[in-house]
Amino acid sequence: MKTKHHLDRFDLKILKELQRNGSLSNQELAERVGLTAAPCSRRVKALEDSGVIAERVVRLDHRAVNLNLIALLHISMDKHIPDRFDSFEKAIGTFPEVLECYLITGHDADYLLKIAVPDMDAYHDFLLGRITRLRGVTGVKSSFMMRKIVDTTALPLDYVSS
């Protein structure tokens, strides 16, 4: 079970540095935040154990792996009942093309998906072969990414009081 973790100024420094570069060695991280290696390592472990650090991943350049088309799909469902949503969410979780999926409000859609595919043909196959075949899907509106303006996973930590 994750526990509540009070973040002090060193924790915030650690989090900012790791968000900039998650591959820092413990020694490099310790030097950047003004700690010695052992206390820095203990703090990182505590941040992981408490769930503040959810995971560490490697981000790939989508074009370098031939995923040249990024699309945003607004999905409308026929019924707003838990069983329908559960079924949709379980199915969507099995599609490797889906990078993000959100249940949304304030729009004519119920879900927003971000997907990555090689090209328009693959998009067509994904849309007609998978998405529109899911029980309850009544509509899909798609937008295609032309250019990234902001691309970050870093959360703004200035709102956290130390």
Image: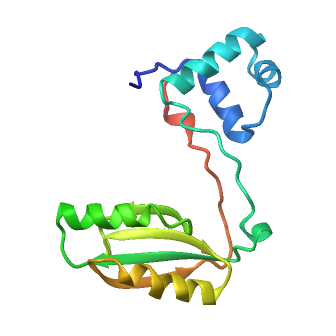
What's the residue at 61%, 45% (across, down)?
154
x then y, percent, for residue 120: 62, 88
Q: Nearer the viewer, residue 129 or 19?
A: 129
Residue 43 appearing in the image: yes
What's the residue at 82%, 20% (across, down)?
27
Left or right placement of residue 64 versus residue 122 in this view: right
Residue 108 appearing in the image: no
In this picture, is 65 found above or below 75? above
Q: Image quadrant of residue 138?
A: bottom left
Left or right placement of residue 94 versus residue 80 in this view: right
In this picture, is 52 found above or below 57? above
Q: Image quadrant of residue 92?
A: bottom left
Q: Nearer the viewer, residue 132 or 108?
A: 132
Quadrant of the drawing holding the N terminus: top left
| Rendered image coloring scheme | rainbow
In this picture, is 124 found above or below 36? below
Q: Nearer the viewer, residue 50 or 145?
A: 50
x then y, percent, for residue 137: 31, 79
Left or right placement of residue 119 versus residue 34 in this view: left
What's the residue at 69%, 73% (across, down)?
67
What's the residue at 68%, 10% (across, down)?
39
